[in-house]
Image (cartoon, rainbow, N blue to C red):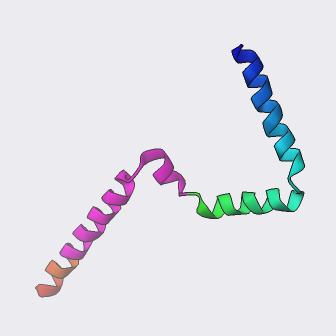
Amino acid sequence: MKGEELVQYITERVVAYFDTPREVRKQARQNQKTVREDWVYRWFGLVPFSLKMWADQQRRRIKEKYKQR
């Protein structure tokens, strides 16, 4: 039963793909590229972002410390 459902699903997807005009498919691909997150966030979540924020904050503190001297 599952094999038949899978074949039916794949067939529906292929038919829907071929039924849509080429320009619409191309535009959809462009939209996906612009909305897509950076690979770093997709692979590792917000950890790289938080580390970058922390490092920037540390750099600012060090610069302020040396400016006061």
Q: How many numbered discs?
A: 0
Magenta-tinted stretch:
37-62
Residue projecting furthest to the top: 1
- What's the residue at 83%, 32% (across, down)? 11
Residue projecting furthest to the bottom: 68
- What's the residue at 17%, 85% (across, down)? 67
Of residues 63 and 18, the one drawn nearer to the viewer in this rendering = 18
* 66 horizontally vs 24: left or right: left
* 58 horizontally vs 40: left or right: left
- Residue 17: image quadrant is top right
Counting from the top left corner in percent of width and height, residue 10 is at: 78, 31
- What's the residue at 38%, 53% (across, down)? 46
Height in image: 58 above or below 37?
A: below
Counting from the top left corner in percent of width and height, residue 55 is at: 29, 64
* 53 horizontally vs 39: left or right: left
- What's the residue at 83%, 44% (across, down)? 16
Height in image: 11 above or below 60?
A: above
Counting from the top left corner in percent of width and height, residue 50 is at: 32, 58
Of residues 10 and 49, the one drawn nearer to the viewer in this rendering = 10
> For the stretch drawn in magenta, what is the main secondary structure?
helix
Of residues 4 and 58, the one drawn nearer to the viewer in this rendering = 4
Q: Would you say residue 68 sits in the magenta stretch?
A: no
Counting from the top left corner in percent of width and height, residue 69 is at: 10, 85
Height in image: 62 above or below 31?
A: below
Q: Where does the N terminus fall, quadrant-wise?
A: top right
